Image (cartoon, grey):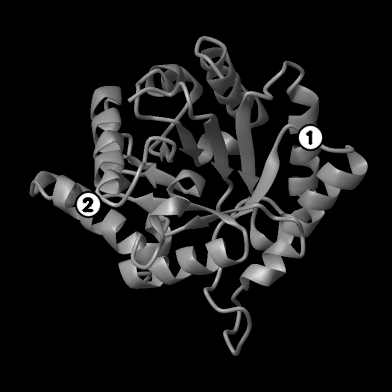
Amino acid sequence: MTTTSRRFVIAGNWKMYKTVDEAHDFTRRLYDQMKDDVSSVDVVICPPTLALDRVTHTIEKELGGAPFSTGAQTMESGDEGAFTGETAPPMLTSLGIQFVILGHSERRQYYNETNETVNKKVQAALKHGLTPIICVGETLAQREAGETDTLIQAQVKAAMTQIDAVILPQLIFAYEPVWAIGTGKTCEATEANRVCGLIRTSLSKIGDASKTRILYGGSVKPDNSLELLSTPDIDGALIGGASLDVSSFTQIVYHAAQLSQKVPA
């Protein structure tokens, strides 16, 4: 596989960082920093839920548009209901949100999300025209037990339950090795690409996955992003810590733009 027909996606997951005012300031600084053309890359920033409205307003009203879009970090699967503290898909679309991260390892670990609940959210996202960034990945214990491939395939299969194969080009998957997130451990580019390729192979059992974009997310930084993005089955990055720094995030976006210019659109 190659990236010749797949646009890079660089998504920043801010997690539980930045107040509304800090998010507004960051958005303006990110806009000012991106002086070069990055139109060949889909850039997404995912602030905390409370900052989504302010960030979207900043982009659309204050900046008159920007070379990046907004995404949510999670959502509930129902349109409405007695789910204290949750956010429904129509609430996101009413703000102009285009993307939503689903099944992130921290949601699975701390909030008991399962393959089944993630699948329900994927169905809900597609129903409301949101592009899901579906996360899959294994823990250190699972990797050391040799369970990586089996687990990844099971997560992918479960996420696609009752999803029409025709939707595959609209989906984004993200491989996030839990053991390489904030631990100091690194996943070599060749292995990251292998697992991303495994995700594509798993999806190919359902339909044509040649246009499905698959991101890598595991301690992506400016000093390793170029190598990771140069591999054939990695179509972008889901970035945590480095997305909180304007300079670091911009450098990674520029690496993607640089590589995009080397292949046909």
Q: Position of residue 209 (x, y in %)?
A: 36, 41
Left or right: 77, with 206 as reference point: right
Residue 187 in view (yes/no) = no
What secondary structure is found at the residue carrying circle 2? Answer: helix
Residue pictured at 59% horizontal, 20% vertical = 251
Circle 1 Cα neighbour tier, 10 Å, few/some/many (<14 / 14–19 / ≥20): some
Nearer the N terminus, badge 2 or badge 1? 1
Using the image, tell me which numbered label, if any, was put on residue 66: 1
Between 101 and 214, the one lying in front of the other is 214
Determine which quarter of the picture holds residue 66.
Answer: top right
Between 170 and 247, the one lying in front of the other is 170
Residue 17 in view (yes/no) = yes
Q: Position of residue 192 (x, y in %)?
A: 29, 32
Viewport quadrant of the N terminus: top left
Viewport quadrant of the C terminus: top right
Relative to residue 147, is residue 159 depicted above or below? below
Relative to residue 85, is residue 105 depicted above or below? above
Residue pictured at 89% horizontal, 38% vertical = 64
Relative to residue 14, is residue 248 depicted above or below? above
Residue bearing mark 2: 153
Using the image, tell me which numbered label, if any, was put on residue 89: none
Q: Position of residue 18 (x, y in %)?
A: 67, 50
Residue pictured at 40% horizontal, 62% vertical = 163
Left or right: 153, with 25 as reference point: left
